Amino acid sequence: MATTFKTFLTNDVVSTRTMLHEAIPMTGTIASGTYTNKAGAEHNIKNYSHGMFQSVYDYPYLSSSANHIYDIAVGYSALSPLSGASSVQNSKKINIYNQMAQVLMGHSASGEILRFDQDGDLLSGGTKLNECVFFNFSRLLTKDEIKKGSFSATFLTGGTQAAPFGALTITDAAATNDFRINSPAGEYGILLDGSSNKLGLLFYQAGVAVLTASVFTSLESFGMLARQRLVSYGIGAPGATYDTSSMESLLTGSHITASCDGIRNRLQSVSFNNTTELNSTIYFCRVNHNDYNYTANPTYLSGSKIRVKNATTDSPVSYITTVGLYSADNELLAVAKLSEPLKKDPTTEFTLRVRLDY
């Protein structure tokens, strides 16, 4: 008897989940956004009239070929000693901090916005990160999340931008087995330097890196925006002067976009592996020996005779080219095409494996 539809049994349908990872390396001018034209203008940096953050692209942002890489912003808590009426864009910097904190850290039972904490201790105690730099990576790069233990960012430190004294690399190397789950935005890990100093937080599903601004301030620890005394490196004479510019003066005396410029221009490289969660449903379409040996294709018949049979005693033959998946109401939901027709007669049986990814 010819069969048009077959109902799947319970063991004919299997669901699976696969994690796919892609390496995302960003180096040089792509990472720092210092890709300039002949006139020296950074056309891959988009500034906004509100002046609260910058967007970095891999190409001039007005181009249709440009891809958004990340946004960068700076901010501090209202409880920070840097907060004050004399600070440039004081309210906006506080608003940025609060916006990021309430999304990534959440609220206390009393409704207060929780501050970023060095160890992830949200409720009480711990060392709070009151002044922060925020890197919000594009969903185009992070996909579903950043893979734990794969993040690395290197900043040029000390000296000038053109002639730095060294480099500072920040990673989440310890987060593979040690991460926090007490954030409303998902899981996050602690960002460390080579000496295991805690320098910030990395939110994996949100794709946001939060760096404490204090890592860039100390003259004695290669502060990113501070120049070291040259004599400390055997250069120059004792008592030589050096630039005392620091992250504090940058945060309080500069607009947000200028602060972002200073930090971004010292970014040498960023790399991580993204994660795409691939959910699959596999349908095992079982074709028994007495199934689908005939077809409803009108060309199968010539008058009342089957074209593929030379004699009445010959076995019927059909060719399977397509598998259709239907709802309980016989509505076509999906179609799978075979790479080549599959010959079917009463002496053969098949199991066709159809996979839907989403």
Image (cartoon, helix red, strand yellow):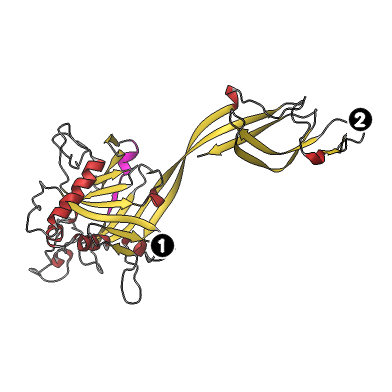
**Does residue 193 show up?**
no
The amino acid type found where label 1 is placed reads Ala
Disc 2 target residue: 312
x and y percent of residue 329 in the render? 59, 29
Q: Earlier in the sequence, mark 2 or mark 1?
A: 1
Disc 1 target residue: 66
- The numbered mark at residue 296 is none
Residue contact between numbered discs 2 and 1, judged by CB atoms under 8 Å: no
Range of magenta residues: 169-177
Magenta stretch contains residue 66? no
The amino acid type found where label 2 is placed reads Thr
Crowdedness near tag 1: few (<14), some (14–19) or many (≥20) residues, C-alpha within 10 Å: some
- Identify the residue shown where x is 11% and y is 47%: 78
What whole-number distance in Å separates the C-alpha atoms at marks 2 and 1?
67 Å
Q: Tell me: residue 128, above or below residue 217.
A: above
Q: Is residue 326 left or right of residue 182?
A: right
Nearest to viewer (mark 2 / mark 1): 2
